[in-house]
Image: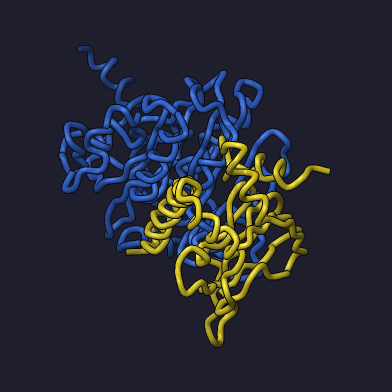
Chain colours: A yellow, B blue
Amino acid sequence: MANLEEILHEHAFFADAPAELIRLVAGCARNHIFHAGEYLFHEGESANEFFLIREGKVALEINAPGHAPIIFETLGVGEFAGASWLIPPYRWVFDARAVELTRTTGIDAACLRGKCEADHDLGYDMMRRFLPALVKRLQATRLQILDVYGQH
Amino acid sequence: MSTASTDVSALRHPDPFVPQIYRVERVSRELPDTITLNLTPLTGSRPSFEPGQFNMLYVFGVGEVAISMSGDPTESAFIHTVRNVGAVSGAIEKIAPGSTIGLRGPFGTAWPVKEAEGSDVIIVAGGLGLAPLRPAIYAILANRVRYGRVVMLLGSRNPKDILYRHELEQWRQRLDVDIEVTVDHADPEWRGNVGVVPKLISVATFDRHDAFGLICGPEVMMRFSVNALIDAGLPADRIYVSMERNMRCAIGLCGHCQFGPTFVCKDGPVMRFDRIANIFAMREI
């Protein structure tokens, strides 16, 4: 069975990451299995962990009274679920649900934030990994809200 | 020019401004606002066409509209999928089997189905954009061994608006085609992807230097998709898009569909991206 460092090293998020970075992050990591329908996190809860998806699919949902939850994005292998741990007040603003059996590696947010504060090189490296993914999600969201397939 | 040869030419190539009369053999409801027509000529057989080309459909007393072919090039009928978005398409959506309709065509350029032989093909469709791509899909699947990996990435507004759903399910059962569908939003019953179609490109498996990319959908979606294909490593001269403009004469005379130095009706609708890259995202073009 692969150890956490090997698992992190194989994840696309840590592509080309130096061994020292992997070692530091692995100290904050643990593995999770979510069965279909189980939630990784709920809106309003403390964002104290984010999840690197190794297998399966995660739906990001938002609830509206009187309606079924609306899925606005799904995340798959090689992606991460959860960005609210990056900024205060560290609270989830959506629900995240496993669509199918999903294996993730969870990273303890307070642990990683603490290491990034203590080692700004680590913090910079982490930001370099998060920022492109977040910008792509922002751009995709802009395209999504244009409702380009609707009649105009 | 002899009279006889003129007559023969006229028979083979009717005046492009004169609609031929076609019978509506069948009307199939695809979506609440979208139907598919099977059209056969009242006399003779229909002209051949290449995937990507279009016809001008004329509803008598209402007007004319350009509609891409969406059927199998080997079928005897012209097949058109039409969404009700205006007066003419609205009249077509209400047309009944057995009635007649005017038709001019085929016009325009084709998808690079032949050129893509020997390469991977990545087909990116958004919404109703799957309709103009479907003839190319039929042609590729009919000669599947001539191509490398075939990838179809399809975007839709929501699961209920997925076009040709039954056919997609059949194609998905093939073991030699990779199909991914994504929707802009869904309820929890949907177990597929949610998000924009360009995102699927970044995770699709295809030869990133030697594939052909065929894209059709709303222009904004095509711009994002072109960028994603280029980011993935596909050369601009391997990317083809199907453009849409206000086509009237359909033979490059009236200028209504001018797109920079080109006319979409005769230089398109299928255009190689590197030839229009400098004007593709330009406003007022």
Identify which residue, B187 or B114, lies in the foreground. Answer: B187
Say which residue appears at 54% left-offset and 72% top-offset.
A92
Residue B89 falls in image quadrant: bottom left
Q: Is residue A69 left or right of residue A145?
A: right
Q: Quadrant of the N terminus of chain B?
A: top left
Q: Position of residue A101 (x, y in %)?
A: 76, 58
The answer to whether residue B40 is seen in the rendering is no
The answer to whether residue A69 is seen in the rendering is yes
Identify which residue, B161 or A79, lies in the foreground. Answer: A79
Residue B243 falls in image quadrant: top left
Say which residue appears at 68% left-offset and 55% top-offset.
A29
Say which residue appears at 48% left-offset and 54% top-offset.
B196
Q: Residue furthest front?
A: A118
Does B208 appear above or below B92?
above
Identify which residue, A128 or B207, lies in the foreground. Answer: A128
Does B46 appear above or below B193?
above
Q: Position of residue B192 (x, y in %)?
A: 63, 57
Q: Is residue A122 left or right of residue A104?
A: left
Q: Position of residue A139 (x, y in %)?
A: 39, 54
Q: Position of residue B23 (x, y in %)?
A: 46, 49
Q: Residue furthest bottom?
A: A66
Q: Quadrant of the C terminus of chain B?
A: top left
Does A84 appear above or below B256?
below
Identify which residue, B117 or B198, lies in the foreground. Answer: B198
